[in-house]
């Protein structure tokens, strides 16, 4: 099984990118399964079902979505194996830029869009820095100059990554992305493999349901801000 | 001391590496020992430094190496190609497309055909260096050769710059700051001067003038288009320019094309505008998903171009007058003459 993690901020076009690439992969005879990770609700599984792509949806609910992801990813692989797929795509929205679902040995794709501004690549953390492929969407509506600056800034943040320009409306770029996905390593299990970047260590009272503001309600791993002492 | 193999790039001094690539400068930050080598600097880092930089030691070393090698590569600018060859595929009904067209730097080719006939498809095929794997079945050769898959994907996006009516500037910066930023990406020697040249050039193309201090998002449609064209001509590394419908913008189209040709680009433009179509050296006619004909612009057509441009100027004058509140009780010449019948 080739496992591909696809991560990116909300609304960059992850689902459109996967659907278009799936079309190319299936034309080449690949059997594809998709797992969609989300927080509260998702309708995207319907989009996959409409294209007759086997899909499972995982809603993290009250649990940290990235922790939920890593606790379930090997089960996803076992499910995909059972239904006879040879390629599993795990789609997740990176909710805080501190997190990254990328796993060693699985192809890591990060999706970002040109509209998010030329400084964005610098601000997205390990989700982009640790990716093998960075797909940049929505290039059809910004200037050539902005596309070049954006791609350059992605390269500065992650010089090892393959950069793919992707148009989620026309599927332009799906041939290239499918090429990288086909080359992903073949795995039997993810057990024992490691995340490329550790998830935040944050066991505090708010993790377990506390809602009240104030020192008296803060327990565990609490980090306080530092403020400048004088007016600039 | 063990004979540890140090990659040559890591023997660069910190200050040299910082000058080479701003990304390295940002990564290293201010350092009390600029004459330390990169390898030496890596040795001084402890766990908390790696935590702050969000890299492990191995990853950081690889990251630095990649940054430096790429920055050195960027000093050799502009991807050059000698020829672009388009080999026919099939039309929408599956019939073979009779096409073998070779284009060289400095060529201007227009792409004409009814809406939906497949003009954009042809531009897409060139953009992704199609190898019989797109709906048209066309194949694109660079310098007479089929690009290797790895090279094909590494090159796609770098070979082709695109301009279309739907593209806008979205970044919240002034024209000067942004163009300078683009020039810095290209590692040109004097980004400030390069930016000034692009802006001066864009102003020659645009009807209404703008300055380096103008906000990008405040530019009019015509000004944006002019800046995009000047930027592609002077700063983009891509040897091929694909233009999709730029006719309605308030810019000097002829000058724009001349500028792109002068910078030795191969220009393909999909257009419905007779002046742009005839200004090209050749025009590709598309019908039902395939190229039906490639027409060399004839001497007679070139002569007509002058007449068409004359009418076009008259049309522009009319447009200007109406924009400034004029009334049009009588049609000016040549529209009002009996010799001209629609």
Image (cartoon, coloured by chain):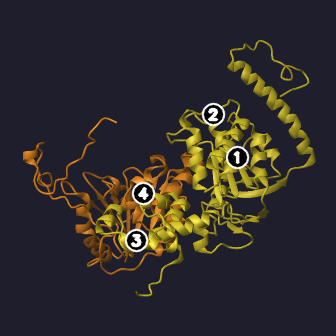
Q: Position of residue B223 (x, y in %)?
A: 64, 35
Chain ID at mark 3: B
> Would you name the residue on which mark 2 appears?
B211
Viewed as shown, does residue B207 lie left or right of A43? right
Question: Between disc 4 and disc 3, whose residue precedes?
Answer: 4
Label 4 sits on a secondary structure element that is loop
**Position of B328 relative to B310 (above/below):** above
| Numbered circle sitting on residue B30 | 4
Q: Which badge, 2 or 4, comes first in the chain's sequence?
A: 4
Q: Give me the residue at 86% from left, 50% from top.
A: B297
Point out the tag, 2 or 1, that comes first from the N-terminus: 1
Is residue A150 depicted above or below B301 in this figure?
below
Q: Secondary structure at mark 3?
A: helix
Toward the viewer: A169 or A82?
A169
- Quick one: which chain is yellow? B
Q: Are marks 3 and 2 on the same chain?
A: yes
Q: Does any portion of residue B42 appear in the rendered image?
A: yes
The image quarter containing residue B222 is: top right
Q: Percent from the top left, x then y, of residue B289?
A: 67, 56
Pick the residue in front: A77 or B78: B78
Cα gap from disc 1 to disc 3, whole angstroms: 61 Å
Tag 3 or tag 1, which sits nearer the N-term? 3
Residue assigned mark 1: B114
Front position among marks 4 and 3: 4
The x and y percentages for residue B147 are 65, 72
């Amino acid at each position: 099984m080739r496992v591909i993690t696809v991560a990116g901020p909300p609304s960059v076009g992850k689902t459109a990118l996967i659907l278009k690439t799936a079309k190319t992969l299936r034309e080449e005879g690949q059997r594809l399964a998709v797992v969609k990770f989300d927080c509260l609700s998702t309708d995207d599984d319907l989009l996959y079902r409409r294209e007759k792509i086997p899909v499972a949806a995982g809603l993290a609910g009250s649990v940290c979505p990235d922790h939920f992801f890593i606790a379930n990813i090997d089960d996803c692989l076992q499910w995909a194996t059972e239904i006879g797929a040879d390629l599993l795509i795990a789609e997740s929205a990176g909710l805080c830029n501190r997190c990254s679902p990328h796993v060693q040995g699985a192809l890591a794709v990060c999706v970002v869009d040109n509209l998010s501004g030329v400084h964005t690549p610098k601000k997205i953390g390990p989700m982009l820095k640790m990716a093998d492929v960075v797909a940049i969407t929505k290039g059809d509506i910004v200037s050539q100059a902005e596309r070049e600056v954006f791609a350059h800034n992605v390269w500065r943040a992650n010089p090892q990554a393959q950069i793919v320009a992707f148009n989620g409306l026309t599927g332009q770029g799906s041939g290239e992305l499918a090429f990288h996905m086909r080359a992903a390593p073949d795995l039997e299990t993810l057990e024992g493999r490691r995340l490329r970047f550790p998830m935040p260590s944050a066991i505090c009272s708010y993790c377990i349901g506390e809602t009240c503001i104030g020192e008296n309600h803060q327990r565990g791993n609490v980090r306080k801000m530092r403020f400048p002492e004088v007016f600039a | 001391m063990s004979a540890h193999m140090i990659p040559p790039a890591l023997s660069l001094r910190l200050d040299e590496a910082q000058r080479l690539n701003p990304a390295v400068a940002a990564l290293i930050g201010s350092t009390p020992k600029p004459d330390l080598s990169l390898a030496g600097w890596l040795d001084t880092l402890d766990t908390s430094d790696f935590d702050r930089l969000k890299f492990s030691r191995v990853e950081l070393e690889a990251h630095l190496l990649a940054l430096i090698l790429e920055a050195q590569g960027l000093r050799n600018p502009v991807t050059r190609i000698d020829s672009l060859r388009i080999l026919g595929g099939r039309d929408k009904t599956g019939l073979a497309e009779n096409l073998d067209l070779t284009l060289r730097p400095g060529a201007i080719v227009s792409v004409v055909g009814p809406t939906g006939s497949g003009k954009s498809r042809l531009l897409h095929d060139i953009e992704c260096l199609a190898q019989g794997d797109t709906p048209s079945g066309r194949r694109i050769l660079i310098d007479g050769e089929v690009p290797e898959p790895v090279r094909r994907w590494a090159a796609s996006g770098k070979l082709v710059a695109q301009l279309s009516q739907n593209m806008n500037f979205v970044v919240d910066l002034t024209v000067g700051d942004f163009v300078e930023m683009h020039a810095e990406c290209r590692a040109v020697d004097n980004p400030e001067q390069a930016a000034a040249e692009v802006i001066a050039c864009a102003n020659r193309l645009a009807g209404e003038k703008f300055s380096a201090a103008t906000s990008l998002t405040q530019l009019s449609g015509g000004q944006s288009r002019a800046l995009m064209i000047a930027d592609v001509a002077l700063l983009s590394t891509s040897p091929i320019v694909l233009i999709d419908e730029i006719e309605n913008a308030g810019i000097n189209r002829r000058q724009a094309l001349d500028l792109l040709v002068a910078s030795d680009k191969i220009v393909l433009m999909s257009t419905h505008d007779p002046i742009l179509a005839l200004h090209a050296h050749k025009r590709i006619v598309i019908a039902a998903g395939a190229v039906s004909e490639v027409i060399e612009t004839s001497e007679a057509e070139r002569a007509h171009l002058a007449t068409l441009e004359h009418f076009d100027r008259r049309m522009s004058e009319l447009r200007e007058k109406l924009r400034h509140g004029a009334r049009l009780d009588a049609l000016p010449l040549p529209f009002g003459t009996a010799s001209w019948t629609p």
